[in-house]
Image (spheres, rainbow, N blue to C red):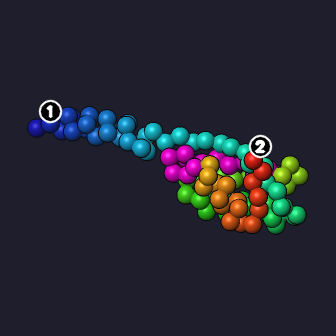
Amino acid sequence: MLRSGVAGLVVAATLALFSGEAMAKEVSTRLQVSGWHCGGCSAATEAALRKVGGVKAAKAELSQGTVSITYDDSVASLADLEKAVEKAGYQVVRK
C-alpha cells in the first residue's frame, strides 16, 4: 500500500512538472503608446491591461509614452496586450 502511494505521488509530481502551469513563463515587455494626452489616458491603459488574463503588472510612464507589462505568456500573448491598448482607444507604436 505504501509503495503504491509513493508511486502515485511521483506520477503526480511528474505531471505537475510538465504541465502548462509548471512551464508558464513570466515575461516583461514595454510597449510604446501614442494618443495619450494626460495621466488619465495612461491610467486607463494600465487598467485595460490589468484586465487581460495573465497580466501580473502594468505601469505606464506618461512622460516616456510607454507602458511596462509583466505577464504569464502561457495565458496572454503580446497580441492580447496590444489589442487591450487599442481597445482602450490608444495606438501601439510598432518599431
Q: Which mark is residue 27?
A: none
Is residue 94 in the magenta section?
no
Mark 1 to mark 2: distance in Å?
58 Å
Which residues lie in the magenta part? 66-77
Total count of labels: 2
Does residue 75 show up magenta in the picture?
A: yes
- Name the amino acid, label 1: Arg
Mark 2 element type: loop
Callout 1 secondary element: helix
Rendered residue at 14%/33% (across/down): 3
Q: Quick one: quadrant of the N terminus?
A: top left
Q: Is residue 58 above or below residue 39?
A: above
| Residue 47 appears in the rendering | no
Q: Give the residue at x 77% y 43%.
A: 95
Q: Residue at x 31, y 35 (%)?
A: 14
- Amino acid type, label 2: Lys
Residue 51: image x %, image y %?
61, 62
Asked if the residues shown at circle 1 and circle 2 are in contact, with their CB atoms under 8 angstroms apart, the answer is no
Please tell me the numbered disc located at residue 3: 1
